[in-house]
Image (tube, rainbow, N blue to C red):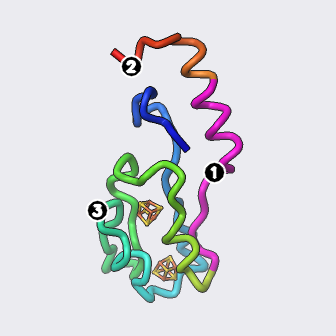
Amino acid sequence: MSSKSVPRNKIPWYPAIDEEKCIGCRECFEFCKNEVFEWDDENNCPKVVNPLNCVVGCSACKNLCSQDAISFPKIQDIKEIIRELRERKDGEFTK
Ligand code: SF4
Ligand code: SF4
């Protein structure tokens, strides 16, 4: 999905962690090289500290999680947001 003409901070694409489901396996934390997560020692689970570092459309960490503890918004909703932003600003972001 191309989102290059829209500022990243307008696109609400990043993981949410369900701490109740997380078993602290660290798979997601060790996999993601974009520093989206920090490890929360107290709760033994990942913490989303840099949400805007998440690559729009990527859901690799969710796919790795055996506990279904990671969720993302619906991709269709994100596409709609991007489409609306492009139409509203009509090229402003491409300058
Ligand atoms: S992969 Fe899932 S269970 Fe493992 S640390 Fe990440 S959120 Fe928790
Ligand atoms: S979706 Fe991709 S970029 Fe985003 S936090 Fe997960 S692994 Fe990192």
Q: Quadrant of the N terminus?
A: top right
Find residue 51 and name its label. Answer: none
Do labels 1 and 2 touch, CB within 8 Å?
Answer: no
Q: Nearer the viewer, mark 1 or mark 2?
A: 2
Find residue 94 and name its label. Answer: 2
Residue highlighted by disc 1 = 73
Please give left or right for residue 85 compared with residue 75 in the image: left
Disc 3, ligand 2: is the CB inside 8 Å?
A: no
* Amino acid identity at mark 2: Thr
Q: Quadrant of the C terminus?
A: top left
Disc 2, ligand 2: is the CB inside 8 Å?
A: no
Instruction: State the SS at label 2.
Output: helix
Instruction: Estimate the x, y position of residue 90 in percent, counting from the top left.
Output: 52, 10
- Other-residue count near label 2 (Cα within 10 Å), few / some / many at <14 / 14–19 / ≥20: few
Please report whichever mark, 1 or 3, sits nearer to the chain's N-terminal start. 3
For the record, the magenta segment spans 68-83
Please give left or right for residue 80 compared with residue 41 in the image: right
Instruction: Estimate the x, y position of residue 75 in percent, counting from the top left.
Output: 66, 48
Q: Is residue 51 above or below residue 80?
A: below
Q: Residue at x 59, y 77 (%)?
A: 20
Q: Is residue 90 above or below residue 57?
A: above
Residue highlighted by disc 3 = 35
Instruction: State the SS at label 1.
Output: loop
